[in-house]
Image: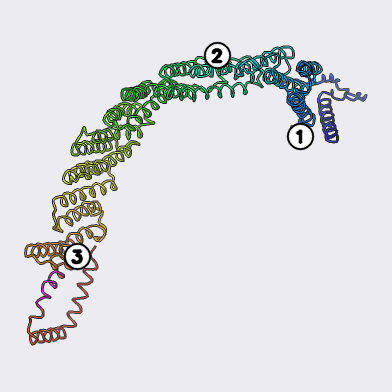
């Protein structure tokens, strides 16, 4: 340890020598000019330049960097010494108190404490800062030990004083002594720090047990005092006071919320008023220039100052059952609306928005937990007002506000249906009307940020409405809702030129037709395949204009329309179906040939051939064998006679089909 102290002293000495040498070199005057040499022409002597003086504004020459500051051995020794002295005092009180008289031990402890405090003042006047602070810390700790021991061991009957009261008196004594000593030795930082720390629990200790509202008031008062003393404290102690004020504020907020929700009615409303008043005092304190830089920003302070009283207010209103829950939620909606109205002011929305959000959330949660879905539906529907205002007045929040403005009515409809205020059919119809409004808004606001938000909210409303109606088995109503939403989505897709939305709209319409057919117990395959084919063909219309290959455009539609019907026509013969399938296949084949499109030509011809072969194959065993042999022989003779010509025609036909698009 001694070697480390010596090394530190040598290092400081070398730094001092380097700094002194640098300052001397910078302040030294220039060398005098040489004496003139006699000659024919003697130049005029130049006046000597004045010695350059160092200025505060002029930067000093570069000084080699000193090593990083670290805890010195002196500080370690002083800290350990003070800690050991306090530990010895504790051991002396705990062990030796019974062996010696109380008065003697009290005199010893008082003498040691006074000696530590006096030595701190003496070293302060000698400029020994580290020793001064160490002795001051030891003196403050010894004073606290003295007061605690006096009560614990019954000195002068002090054990009869209630512990809570004696603790408060002890803290006040330590704080008063520290303040007095701090005025005597103004260079000591420990004394004001000890006074600040000792004064923290005093207000809470003076509050009677069970006075919950008074405890919250005491915590708020402590926080206020910590903020006020910021203007009188030394800069080094300001962060400590800030932390203590924040801690007291957090204790007051948590305790106040707990009292508002679980305490008596009087305490709940008292605490709500106290927290509301505290939230209003913070902006007033920020008007003091010396406090404005050390308090939280205006926006965070306003938000916290409104959210905490809102929690307490919700708890106070919660004890009035449905009326209180509804009042809390309604008040929150009103505050949210006011926040949108006064959005041009920076601080007011920061207070109204958290307060309104907390009240709405807590009030709505209480209504939902108790199954009051009807009242909750009214609250959710009222939430459309601030959402719509935000969508109009706040461009930055417009997409999210549009989503909220569309989903609030949809949610209100579902809640009203859950309460029994609306029937399933009416609820589904209202839900799909919200979806239609969303698609219309998306069409009007095409190419804007809120377009996709409105379309997404409308799609979600459609899905929820359809699922709600489908749960009751009203398939016709479900098909109608899907059809309305699909038509609205299709109109939006045409206006905004959204091919993906157009495909989804067509799919929605196809599903609507399927749901309607299934609800009517229709088993005809064409009732399902033809709408799908029409949808595929409708989606392929833009591709037909661009002229792509037929298999990517109308091919899927032709296959969906003809292939299932051809299979059914062969498997389950029916004169009407057979006639319609043959006519349709022939028409598609001819259309493909005339338009030179490969997919409809191949699909139609294949379906026609499949139907013909399928319908004639049952009659093959009925043909006489000799007739079969004769037909086959004549066919072979004809093929052999015209082989070369037919071969050339087959190549031309194949090439013609291949050349189709």
Going 21% across and 58% down the picture, which residue do you hit?
557
Q: Secondary structure at mark 2?
A: loop
Q: Secondary structure at mark 3?
A: helix
Q: Is residue 355 left or right of residue 297?
A: left
Q: From the viewer's perspective, is the residue at label 1 or at label 3 nearer?
A: 1
Going 23% across and 71% down the picture, which residue do you hit?
655
Along the viewing direction, whichever of 581 and 379 lies nearer the viewer: 379
Q: CA distance from mark 1 to mark 3?
A: 89 Å
Q: Position of residue 270 (x, y in %)?
A: 44, 16
Whichever of labels 1 and 2 marks the residue nearer the N terminus, that label is 1
| Residue named by callout 1 | 67
Q: CA distance from mark 1 to mark 2?
A: 41 Å
Q: Quick check: is 112 in the magenta stretch?
A: no
Q: Position of residue 120 (x, y in %)?
A: 77, 18
Mark carried by residue 288: 2
Above-or-below relation of 474 to 75: below
Q: Quadrant of residue 440?
A: top left
Q: Position of residue 358 (x, y in %)?
A: 40, 27
Whichever of labels 1 and 3 marks the residue nearer the N terminus, that label is 1
- Using a 10 Å C-alpha cutoff, classify the residue at mark 2 as few (fewer than 14 neighbours), some (14 to 19) or many (20 or more): few
Segment tinted magenta in the rendering: 610-619
Quadrant (top left, top right, bottom left, bottom right) of the C terminus: bottom left
């Amino acid at each position: 340890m001694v070697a480390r102290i010596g090394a530190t002293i040598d290092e400081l000495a070398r730094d001092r020598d380097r700094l002194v040498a640098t300052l001397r070199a910078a302040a030294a005057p220039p060398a005098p000019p040489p004496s003139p040499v006699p000659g024919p022409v003697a130049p005029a002597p130049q006046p000597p330049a004045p010695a350059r003086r160092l200025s505060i504004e002029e930067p000093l020459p570069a000084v080699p960097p000193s090593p990083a500051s670290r805890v010195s051995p002196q500080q370690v020794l002083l800290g350990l010494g003070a800690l050991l002295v306090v530990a010895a005092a504790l051991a002396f009180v705990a062990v030796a108190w019974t062996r010696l008289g109380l008065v003697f031990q009290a005199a010893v402890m008082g003498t040691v404490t006074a000696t530590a405090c006096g030595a701190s003042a003496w070293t302060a006047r000698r400029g020994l800062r580290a020793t001064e602070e160490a002795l001051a810390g030891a003196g403050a700790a010894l004073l606290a030990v003295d007061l605690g021991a006096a009560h614990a061991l019954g000195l002068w009957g002090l054990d009869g004083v209630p512990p809570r009261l004696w603790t408060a008196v002890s803290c006040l004594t330590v704080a008063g002594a520290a303040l007095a000593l701090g005025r005597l030795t103004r260079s000591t930082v420990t004394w004001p720090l000890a006074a600040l720390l000792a004064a923290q629990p005093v207000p809470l200790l003076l509050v009677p047990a069970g006075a919950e509202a008074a405890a919250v008031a005491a915590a708020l008062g402590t926080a206020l005092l910590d903020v006020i003393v910021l203007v009188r404290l030394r800069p080094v102690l300001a962060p400590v006071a800030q932390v203590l004020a924040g801690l007291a504020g957090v204790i007051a907020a948590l305790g106040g919320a707990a009292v508002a929700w679980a305490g008596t009615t009087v305490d709940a409303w008292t605490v709500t008023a106290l927290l509301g008043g505290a939230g209003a005092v913070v902006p007033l304190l920020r008007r003091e220039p010396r406090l404005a830089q050390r308090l939280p920003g205006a926006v965070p302070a306003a938000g916290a100052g409104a959210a905490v009283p809102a929690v307490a207010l919700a708890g106070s209103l919660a004890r009035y059952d449905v009326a209180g829950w509804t009042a809390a939620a309604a008040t929150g909606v009103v505050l949210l609306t006011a926040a949108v109205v006064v959005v041009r002011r920076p601080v007011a929305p920061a207070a109204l928005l958290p307060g309104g959000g907390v009240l709405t959330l807590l009030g709505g949660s209480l209504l939902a937990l108790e199954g009051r879905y009807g009242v909750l539906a009214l609250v959710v529907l009222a939430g459309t007002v601030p959402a719509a205002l935000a969508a109009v007045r706040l461009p930055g929040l417009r997409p999210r506000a549009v989503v909220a403005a569309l989903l609030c009515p949809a949610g209100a409809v579902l809640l009203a249906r859950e309460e029994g205020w609306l029937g399933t059919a009416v609820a589904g119809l209202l839900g799909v009307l919200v979806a239609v409004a969303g698609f219309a808004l998306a069409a009007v606001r095409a190419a804007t940020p809120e377009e996709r938000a409105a379309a997404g909210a409308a799609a979600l409303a459609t899905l929820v409405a359809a699922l709600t109606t489908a749960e009751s088995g009203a398939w016709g109503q479900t098909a109608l809702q899907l059809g309305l939403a699909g038509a609205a989505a299709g109109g939006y897709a045409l206006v905004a030129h959204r091919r993906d939305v157009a495909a989804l709209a067509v799919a929605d319409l196809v599903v609507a037709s399927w749901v309607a057919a299934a609800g009517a117990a229709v088993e005809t395959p064409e009732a399902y395949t033809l709408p799908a084919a029409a949808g595929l063909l409708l989606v392929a219309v833009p591709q037909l204009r661009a002229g792509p290959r037929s298999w990517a455009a109308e091919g899927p539609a032709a296959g969906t329309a003809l292939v299932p019907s051809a299979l059914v026509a062969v498997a389950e013969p029916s004169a009407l179906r057979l006639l319609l399938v043959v006519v349709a296949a022939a028409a598609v084949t001819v259309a493909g040939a005339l338009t030179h499109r490969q997919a409809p030509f191949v699909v139609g011809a294949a379906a026609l051939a499949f139907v013909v072969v399928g319908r004639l194959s049952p009659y093959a065993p009925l043909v006489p064998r000799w007739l079969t042999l004769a037909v086959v022989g004549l066919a072979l003779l004809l093929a052999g006679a015209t082989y070369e010509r037919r071969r050339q025609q087959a190549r031309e036909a194949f090439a013609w089909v291949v050349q189709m698009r």
